[in-house]
Image (cartoon, grey):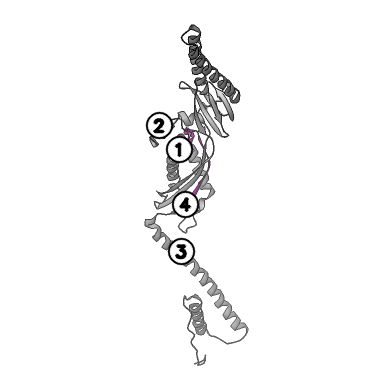
Amino acid sequence: MENKEFTFKGMTVNGFLMLFVNLFLTILSIALIVLGVNIGESAQGITAGVGGGVLLLVAIIMWCGMMQLEPNEARVMLFFGKYKGTFTKVGFYWVNPFLSAKKLSMRARNLDVEPIKVNDKTGNPVMIGLMLVWKLKDTYKAMFEIDSQTMAQSGNQNAVGNSVSSIMKAFENFVKVQSDAALRQTAGLYAYDDNEQDTGELTLRSGGEEINRQLEEKLDERLNMAGIEIVEARINYLAYAPEIAAVMLRRQQASAIIMAREKIVEGAVSMVKMALQKLGEDNVVELDDDKKAAMVSNLMVVLCGDEPAQPVVNTGTLNH
């Protein structure tokens, strides 16, 4: 898309110089009006009064050309509706008073998007939230490619069309709507997790930086039309929706229990093997296959059981 934004090249004068000029003209016009009143209805009095009135009107119009700009601010300059460029010079200046200047903030802004319910790739409802940092990069698109002024006025009945706060609030609402759409689109492409299967597929839980990068790309595509740049976008909240959270928690608990049992059994088998090996090497007792099987069974019960084992003293002999 063609870049229609350009720097304002119209006449600008140092604001402090024009401040003194306007003060001089204002004082001079008032003095002429007073002089005309004092002289009376003579030709000199009428001339002084009319000249003072005209000069006062000129001074009032010239006062409207004063403009102050802070760092990371911009003003879109319009001459009776025609775009004349974007003014970004920091300081105090005087410009053509017939130019209208719409003030915009180019500073970075945060937006914490409340978690929304979406369906992941497998159809599971999940709650996902977003935090992003954005700023304006193209003032022409921001002012004229989207209806920011109407959005600002519709959001507040008392808002002024060129109020920077109301216009920036309108941009924030626009970003919020588009971020919701991008978040839904991104979340629908991936599953919440791999369901304890080593598939190697990217998921919302394990994606991390890759998911955030794709989210930034989708947001940039949607917000480029409004001249808005995404500095950073990150998923800051991810959880199953309340209606399936309890079921998924039980599934995760079951998976954790199975994994723990596997470790316990693995360790128990190793300990039983070591016990039989040590008994054989040290000639502590000779066990036939039946006794070994019974011993293995007892040790496995003791080592793998959830409750403490109750010892039983055998007062008999190993041989029948």
Amino acid carrying label 4: it is Tyr
Q: Which residue is tagged 4?
A: 237
Q: Which residue is tagged 1?
A: 169
Q: Which residue is tagged 3?
A: 255
Q: Which residues are magenta?
A: 221-236
Element type at mark 1: helix
Task: Mark 3 and mark 2 in contact? Answer it, CB < 8 Å.
Answer: no
Number of residues whose C-alpha sits closer than 10 Å to that of mark 2, classed few (under 14), some (14–19) or many (20 or more): few
Asked whether residue 224 appears in the rendered view, the answer is yes
The residue most toward the right is 282
Distance, label 4 to label 3, CA atoms, is 23 Å
Distance, label 2 to label 4, CA atoms, is 33 Å
Say which of marks 3 and 1 sits in front: 1
Looking at marks 2 and 1 on the same chain, the residue that comes earlier in the sequence is marked by: 2
Looking at marks 3 and 1 on the same chain, the residue that comes earlier in the sequence is marked by: 1
Element type at mark 2: helix
Number of residues whose C-alpha sits closer than 10 Å to that of mark 4, classed few (under 14), some (14–19) or many (20 or more): some
